Amino acid sequence: MIRYRKTLGWGLLFVVLSNLAGIVSPLIVKQGIDYLSGDVQFVKLMEYAAWIIGFTLIAGTFRFFMRKTVIVVSRLIENDLRNDLFAKLQTLDRAFYQKNDTGDLMSRLTNDLNAIRSVLGPGLMYTVNLITSFIFITIMMLQISPLMTLIALLPVPVMAVVVNRFGAAIHKRYLKVQEQFARISTRAQENLAGIRVIKAYALEESEWRHFNELNREYVERNMHYARAEAGFRPSMMLIVGISSALILLFGGRLIMQDVISLGDFVAFTLYMGQLIWPSIALGWVMGIFLQGTAAHQRLMHIFNARPVVNDAQADTAARISRGDIEFRNLGFTYPGYERPVLRDISLKVEAGKIIAVVGRTGAGKSTLMHMLTREYNPAPETLFVDGYDIRRIPLKALHEAIGYVPQETFLFSDTIRNNIAFGAPGATEEEIRRAAEVASLASAIEEMPKGYDTMLGERGINLSGGQKQRLAIARAIVRQPQILLLDDALSAVDTITEEAILQRLKEIMKNRTCFWVSHRISAIRDADHIIVMDDGRIIEQGDHQALMAVNGLYADLYTKQMIQEQLEHLQ
C-alpha cells in the first residue's frame, strides 16, 4: 500500500469530499420545506432544486473518482502481491513443496488473493466512507436536535455486540470453506495430471464419486458460512429499522410541541437515510474483512516460510570454475526419518571425469545427486566443489554451474526449441541443434511436422518416454555446465542409443565433470570411474575391468543384465 500512498491518499480524500458534498443537500431540503410555510415563489423553489442537483452532481463526481482511485489501487496491489507470492514460491526449497499440496497453493494464489484485494478495495473504501459519514452526519444531526441524535444512536452498542458475535463465527467458518476448496483444487489437479492412469484403470466413476464427496462437503461448509452471513446483514437492517422507528415516534412529538420544524425533521430523516446504507454496509464490510483476515493468515503461511536450504553461510566470492568434487565422510538422513540414506561417502573426482553410479534400487544414488544440487543440505565440511564447502557457494552460482536431468522428466507446453533452450534463454540456433545431436534427438525432431517449432502438449504428452528423456538431456547440455548430473536419465532409451550419447558426452564434457546414474551397467562400462552403492555406502569402485575382477555386487549385476539381454535378443 505504501507504493501507492499518493493515489490512495487522493482516493480517501475523494471519500471525505463526497461525504461533505452529500451532507449539504438535506440542509437545502430543510430550507426549502420551511420556505413552503410562507409566501412561495416558483423561482425560489427552482433555485433550491438547482442547488440540490448541483451538490448531488458534485458528490457523485467525487464518488466516481473515489472508486476510480481506491479500486484501481486495490487491483494494482493484487497484481504486486501475486508477483511477490510467485517470486517467494521460487525461493522455497523441496521440503516446503513436500509439505504443501499444489492445489492448496493454487487456492491461496486465487481465492485468498481475491479476498485480500476485496479488503484493500471495497473494504477500505467503505470503511472510510462509514467513518466519515458517521462523523459528518452526527455533527449535522446534533445541530438539529441533540435528543433525537441520542435516540438515533441508542442501537449502536447493540450493533457492536452483533458484529462481534457474528464476526467470530464468520471468520471461523470461512477458514473451513477455504480449507475444503484447497482439497478440491488438489484433487482436481491430481486427476487432470493423472488422467491417463485413471482411464487406463477405468476408475473414472470412482474418481467422480470421490470428487463429488469433496464437493458436497464444500457446499455444506459454504451453507454453514452463508447461514452466519445471512443472519448478520438482516440483524444490522433490523437495528437500523428500530432506530428509524424511534426517530419517527419521538421526532413527530417534537414537531407537535414546536421544538423542531417540519424541515428539521425531514432533514434529520434524510441524514438517517444517508446512514442506513453505511450501517447495512458495515455487515458486508465486516464480512469482507473477516474473509480477508482468514485469507491473510493463509497467505502469510507462504510469506513466512523460510527455506532450509539457503545462502546463510554463502561466500559471495565463491564460484565454480573447474568442477572438482570431493565427498568427505558424507552422511545424510531425510528430515523426519531415523534411518540414514547415505553413510560415510568418501570420493574425490577430478574435473573432466565421467563417474558412473550403479547399485540396487534404494541404494542412495539419487540422494547423492540431491546433495550436489543442494536440494537438501549436506553436513558442513562433507562436500566440496572446487575446494569450497558446497554450503559456502551461493545457490544461484551453484545451479548456474550444474546441468541436472532428474529421473522424472518435466517438459513445458511450449515448442521443442524453447524447451531445449529453457535453461539458456540466449542459446543460438546452432547451440540448440548441437545439443539435440549430442542427445541423439536431432533426427527425430527433423521428422516432426514443424521441426524445432513443434508444440509439445502438457508435460510433453506427444513425445515418447525416450524422446522426453533425450530432450531433457539436450536442455541440460545446452547450458554448457561445469557439472552434469544424469540421474537414471536414459532408462527409457535403448542400450545402443545410450552408449552413443555417452560417447558424445565424452567429447563435449572434456574438462567438465559428469555423474551418470544408471541401472544399465552395459552402457556405463566405459566410464572413467564407476562407484557401486548399496545401503547408502560405496562398497566398490574402480573401472569396469577392476570391478569385474573383484567379483562382487557389480559383477553380479552385470552378469545378470547380460543374461537378460541375451534372452530378450533370442525372443
Image (cartoon, grey):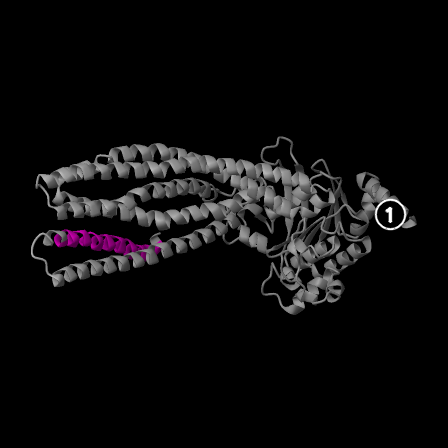
- In this rendering, would 497 be left or right of 390? right
Residue at screen point 62% across, 30% down: 338
- Nearer to us in this view, 485 or 21: 21
Q: Position of residue 540 (x, y in %)?
A: 76, 40
The magenta region covers 3-32
Our reading of the magenta stretch's main secondary structure is: helix
- Nearer to us in this view, 49 or 103: 49
Q: Position of residue 216 (x, y in %)?
A: 55, 37
Q: Position of residue 278 (x, y in %)?
A: 29, 45
Residue at screen point 60% across, 39% down: 212
| Amino acid type, mark 1 | Glu
Residue 12 visible at all = yes
Would residue 5 be counted in the magenta stretch? yes
- Vertical position of residue 341 compared to residue 41: above or below: above
Assign a secondary structure to mark 1. helix
For mark 1, what is the residue?
A: 565
Q: Residue furthest right?
A: 570
